[in-house]
Image (spheres, grey):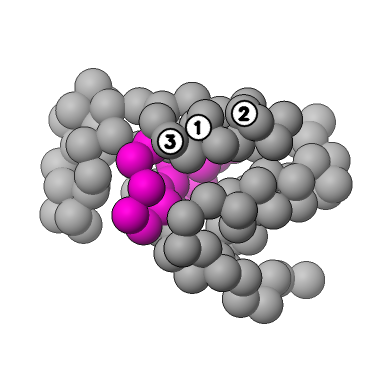
Amino acid sequence: MGGPWLENLDGVTVRDVGEVQCGIVSFSVEGVEAGKVREALRGRGVNVWTSKVSNNTRLEWEGRAERGMPKEIVRASVHYYNSGGEIARLVEAVEGCGVVTRRKLPE
């Protein structure tokens, strides 16, 4: 849900692996530690958490390690009950972190 929109921000890398995606979106912001992103988003009223990649499943860890995964990533839970406005607020808040600029969002 939030992943396709976050992928359209330069400076943001969506880190989810697997063919089928779920409501948890894992991402990183170029040049900004995951904890700093979490703090910045919290200041904008958006709740996310961070996850140490080494704490994930082995399959997930190996898949991500091959992609140059940072040690810690940001995770947002985006589900069916989140409105389009809430997802847009997440994207706008992430856009305010670090070196992020917006590309064209999917329609």
In the rendered view, tell whether residue 5 sits above or below residue 46. Answer: below
Question: Which amino acid, by three-letter code, is at mark 2?
Answer: Arg
Q: Secondary structure at mark 1?
A: helix
Q: CA distance from mark 1 to mark 3?
A: 5 Å
Labels 1 & 3 near each other (Cβ < 8 A): yes
Q: Position of residue 81 (x, y in %)?
A: 80, 31
Q: CA distance from mark 3 to mark 2?
A: 10 Å
Name the residue rendered at 69%, 71% in the picture: 105
Residue 15 left/right relative to 1:
left
Residue sitting nearer the eye, 68 or 33: 33
> Which residue position is annotated with label 1?
38
> Which residue position is annotated with label 3?
36
Name the residue rendered at 50%, 32% in the picture: 38
Residue 90 left/right relative to 17:
right
Q: Position of residue 32 (x, y in %)?
A: 37, 47
Disc assigned to residue 42: 2
Q: Where, by quadrant of the figure, is residue 41 drawn?
A: top right
Labels 1 & 2 near each other (Cβ < 8 A): yes
Question: Which amino acid, by three-letter code, is at mark 1?
Answer: Arg
Residue sitting nearer the eye, 66 or 11: 11
Residue 36 in sight: yes
Magenta residues span 19-34
